[in-house]
Image (cartoon, helix red, strand yellow):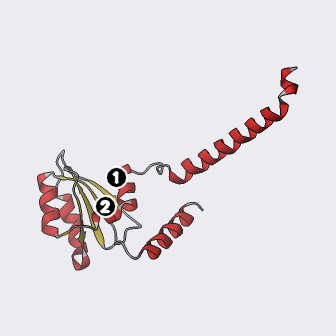
Amino acid sequence: MSLTKHRKQLIRVLAAGGIAAGAALLWFTLHGPERGRNPLAVSMETESAAYFASERDLTTLTQDVQSGSAAGIGLSSEYALVSRRDGTRYYVHMDSQRALVPELVKGGQSSTAPEIFALDHVQPPGPPLATFRSRVRRRASTSR
């Protein structure tokens, strides 16, 4: 008897719960980590502005690889993003030296060798509207 007495309230609660569950599913689908991708590679693409705050050269990259202080290296068509074990980040503009980078990175084949990733969507930070537009285009292309 009490079920029929509180039917409208029960329907409202169930509808609100369904809407909340749908919103949570949508949010986690859009903002969740990509399956099969290393979290460091994903953070290099999404937080690339932190890497572009400091520029270094190939000599520094080579020293970091050989000393074992580089934790991860992301390679794009123009840039190498480097995450060090001490938490610092920087980038190297490869320009005409692009062919040298794979050889330099391969030099550290020890147990402290950095993880190496291929990055697709890495550009230096630009004007806010251009940055927003590129993020929207990237998300639209990955959701298809």
Mark 1: amino acid? Leu
- The secondary element bearing badge 2 is classed as strand
Q: Where is residue 27 in the image (x, y as percent from the top left)?
A: 57, 50
Q: Position of residue 93 (x, y in %)?
A: 25, 73
Q: Name the residue under label 2.
A: 74
The image quadrant that residue 17 belongs to is: top right
Which quadrant of the figure contains the N terminus? top right
Q: Is 32 left or right of 46, judged from the image as shown? A: right
User: Is the Cβ of the residue at disc 1 closer than 8 Å to that at disc 2?
Assistant: yes
**Label 2 environment density (alpha carbons within 10 Å; few <14, some 14–19, many ≥20):** many
Image point (53%, 63%), residue name: 139
Which quadrant of the figure contains the C terminus? bottom right
**Label 1 environment density (alpha carbons within 10 Å; few <14, some 14–19, many ≥20):** some
> Which label belongs to residue 96?
none
Using the image as rendered, state which of residue 82 and residue 46 is in the foreground: 46
The image quadrant that residue 101 belongs to is: bottom left
Image point (53%, 62%), residue name: 142
Which dot, 1 or 2, sits closer to the camera? Answer: 1
Q: Position of residue 9 (x, y in %)?
A: 79, 34
The image quadrant that residue 46 belongs to is: bottom left
Mark 2: amino acid? Gly
Q: How far apart are marks 1 and 2 (CA)?
A: 9 Å
Q: Name the residue under label 1.
A: 40
Q: Which residue lies furthest to the top in this view?
A: 1
Q: Is 25 left or right of 13, judged from the image as shown? A: left
Q: Is 25 left or right of 64, judged from the image as shown? A: right
Q: Position of residue 74 (x, y in %)?
A: 31, 61
Which comes before the other along the chain, label 1 or label 2? Answer: 1
Image point (20%, 59%), residue name: 106
